[in-house]
Amino acid sequence: TFNCVVYFVRKADSQEIRWGTDSPIQVRDKVWGVRTDVRVRGAYKVRIVNGVKFLEKLIGNNVPFQTQFELQKYFESEFQGKIKSAVSKYLNALQQELIGIDAYMDELSGQIEPYINEALDDYGLKCVKFSLAGLDVDVTKYDMLDASQIELIARQRGYQGDKAGLEIL
């Protein structure tokens, strides 16, 4: 007798896989010199581009999976590290303030995708669409900066009023 196992590899895009940083990323705002925390979340889709490589890597490593959820759990920690590293590099190199960074989420998504593909390539997978859904900057320190600037403006206006009063006298 001849025994064999047949695997069918679906090469369509996966369902959307949601992700989020499990811990905050520490970033320094270059404009204000403030260290703050950033949390990022989004989604991506993958596609099997090399079925042989995919099966050899996962079956050869005795990875028990039957569903996309089980496969997602297998890759979760590796992706989290790559995503956090790419976001941290991008935000720490940014020469503008972090408030309003949401306008650059498409650009940031495009810069993170190659890091994800680098991790997936060893498994015969490719990231089809990587996107950021949210970038949450901890604004408590910015609120303190705003309050101090408002206080400074109020004092300046008071001094200007005092100066005007003295000039009249």
Image (tube, rainbow, N blue to C red):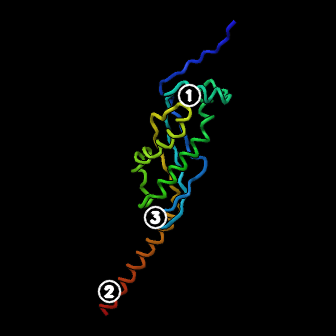
Q: Residues within 10 Å of mark 1 (few under 14, many from 20)?
A: some
The amino acid pointed to by label 1 is Lys
Quarter location, residue 149: bottom left
Label 3 close to label 1 by CB (< 8 Å): no
- Give whichever of 48, 45 is nearer the camera: 48
Which residue is under mark 3? 30
Q: Residue at x 60, y 36 (%)?
A: 75
- Give whichever of 3, 47 is nearer the camera: 3
Task: Name the quarter where the C terminus is drawn.
Answer: bottom left
- Residue positioned most to the front: 1
User: Which callout, 3 or 1, points to the residue nearer the camera?
Assistant: 1
The amino acid pointed to by label 3 is Lys
Which residue is under mark 2? 164
Q: Secondary structure at mark 2?
A: helix
In the rendered image, residue 34, in percent from the top left (x then y), is placed at: 51, 65
In the rendered image, residue 29, in percent from the top left (x then y), is placed at: 48, 62
The amino acid pointed to by label 2 is Ala
In the rendered image, residue 63, in percent from the top left (x then y), is placed at: 66, 29
- Give whichever of 121, 25 is nearer the camera: 121
Which residue is under mark 1? 53
- Real-space Cα distance between discs 1 and 2? 79 Å
Is 102 located above or below residue 149 in the figure?
A: above
Label 1 close to label 2 by CB (< 8 Å): no
Sequence-wise, the earlier of marks 3 and 2 is 3
Sequence-wise, the earlier of marks 1 and 2 is 1
Q: Residues within 10 Å of mark 2 (few under 14, many from 20)?
A: few
Q: Residue at x 34, y 91 (%)?
A: 166
Is 169 located above or below residue 9 in the figure?
A: below
Task: Name the quarter where the N terminus is drawn.
Answer: top right
Q: Which mark is residue 128?
A: none
